[in-house]
Amino acid sequence: MKLAALLPFLAAFLLTGCATPSPEDSLVDALGALDAAPSIQSKVYPQKIVGRWYGDQPTREGGRKRWSPRYTAGGYLDIEFIITDRSGEATVTRDNCIWAVHGDFLLTTELRPDGPRKWAVRSEPQAWIVYKIIHLDDSEFRYRSLITGVEYVVHRVADNFEIPVE
């Protein structure tokens, strides 16, 4: 399926204003927007994605990005990042998100730390990130950002995995 065919549906979804929805409503709205694209083939990915993964790849700037996402069956996603710039200086960050899969697409939106956690709303297009699932099996997960075109590869690790300190 061509990305151009999906863009009008995503644009309509992202540009529609609304009150702050519950997490369930946010995911239902996101999936509803994708439902409008009838050519999306449905696959059973969510059960395979649940668990902890680890990725390590070079950055475009000559540094290194290491990250470990943990997807829960309840739709939460916790990601720890260690980004090392080309001089060797490392920055550690953590993102808390919600996630869903529809067809060949992974949707994520960040949970916000300002007071009670506030869910992203459709009027904030930058809040939703959509990835094309390229490959998923029990040990490897490859996906591509529809925004940047960058392809990411992660491998399944134990639930107690921690990113190695260098």
Image (spheres, rainbow, N blue to C red):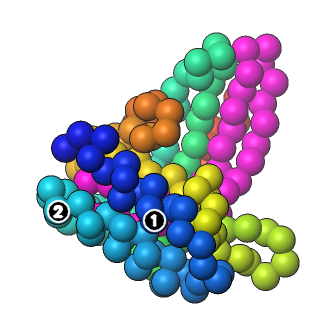
Distance, label 1 to label 2, CA atoms, is: 16 Å
The 10 Å Cα crowd at callout 2, few under 14, some 14 to 19, many 20 or more, is: few
Which secondary structure dominates the residues rendered in magenta?
Answer: strand
The 10 Å Cα crowd at callout 1, few under 14, some 14 to 19, many 20 or more, is: some
Is residue 33 toward the left or the right of residue 93 in the image? left
Give the magenta-colored segment's residue range.
79-108
In terms of secondary structure, where does tag 1 sit? helix
Task: Determine whether 124 is above or below 80 in the image.
Answer: below
Q: Which of 83 and 146 is in front in this view?
A: 146
Amino acid type at circle 1 is: Phe
Amino acid type at circle 2 is: Pro
Residue 13 is tagged as 1
In reply to whether residue 105 is colored magenta, the answer given is yes
Identify residue for label 2.
Answer: 38
| Quadrant position of the C terminus in the picture | top right
At horizontal 17% and vertical 62% (from top left) the residue drawn is 38
At horizontal 54% and vertical 62% (from top left) the residue drawn is 15
Measured as percent of width and height from the top left, residue 92 is found at 76, 43
Measured as percent of width and height from the top left, residue 14 is found at 51, 61
Sooner in the amino-acid sequence: mark 1 or mark 2: 1
